[in-house]
Amino acid sequence: MMTTDQPVTSPSARCDGAVAHHSLLRHPFYLAWSDGTLPVAALKDYARDYGIFIRTVAAGWEAVGESHVAGIEEGHAEVWANTFAAGLETQVDGPQTEEVTTLVDTASALFADRVTALGALYAFESQQPYTAQSKLRGLREHYQQLPECCGEYFRLHTDDFDEPALLSEHMNALSSAEADRAVAACERLSVALHDALSGLYAPHKN
């Protein structure tokens, strides 16, 4: 009986497919931010609500066993609150957007388990350098009236490729069953992240 070796797609490559299908960089919210048509009021809502999700990220890193990275993420959440949110004269609170509440609840559930935390974190961290570059450029080109400190959180993440690489390494060492769980978690958080932007954008569409 003849057999043909079939290429095995890595968990991280499978996650890349799920992330691409729900790309944040192509979401109308970020596109409007990039071209300067997103109202400052929408940025303010984003800073207030989405900051709650940013605060959950450290727990995910703790779950995967990377306490050092978790500590860095706790600091980054403070940067978000003290520069981006404060610069927009708001504070991290709520969230007041239903879809962001769903995102926070979804992330908290997935970040409670090492395997699902790996996939869920990858959904966020693999996109963050690219979205940070886009958002920082948008702030600099179109929102000069805002304090310069508003871009600090994004500046910190423009070349942050080490974290998704670390998650990829961990995921690619999982068993087949664990890999399936991680990929499912990545897909689930990718959807929740995308939906959160939709919820934030809805009140501010032209």
Image: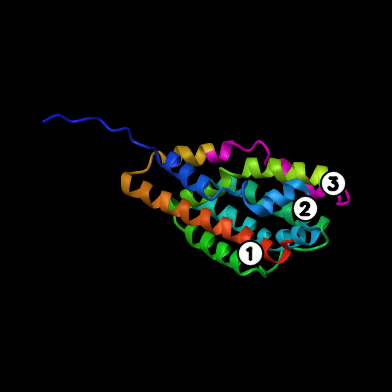
Q: Residues within 10 Å of mark 3 (few under 14, many from 20)?
A: some
Q: Position of residue 59 (x, y in %)?
A: 55, 55
Q: Quadrant of residue 50?
A: bottom right
Give the residue number, with chain letter if any, for mark 3. Answer: 148
Name the residue at the front extreme: 206
The answer to which quarter of the image holds residue 102 is: bottom right
What stretch of residues is rendered in magenta?
Answer: 143-164
Q: Residue at x 67, y 70 (%)?
A: 96
Amino acid carrying label 3: it is Glu
- The label nearer to you, 3 versus 1, is 1
Q: Amino acid at mark 2?
A: Thr
Tell me the element at label 2: loop
> At which x and y percent is residue 183?
42, 49
Residue at the farthest left position: 1
- Name the quadrant of the C terminus: bottom right
Q: Nearer the viewer, residue 2 or 89?
A: 2
Sequence-first disc among 2 and 3: 2
* Residue under label 2: 37
Q: Quadrant of the N terminus?
A: top left
Q: Is residue 65 magenta?
A: no
Residue drawn at point x = 53 percent, y = 48 percent: 123
Q: CB of mark 3 within 8 Å of CB of mark 1?
A: no
Which comes sooner in the sequence, label 2 or label 1? Answer: 2
Q: Is residue 148 visible?
A: yes
- Which residue corresponds to mark 1? 199
- Secondary structure category for the residue under label 1: helix
Q: Does 182 appear above or below 133?
A: below
Whole-number angstrom distance, CA of label 2 to CA of label 1: 17 Å
Tell me the distance, in whole angstroms, between the alpha carbons under discs 3 and 1.
27 Å
Q: Say whether residue 153 is magenta.
A: yes
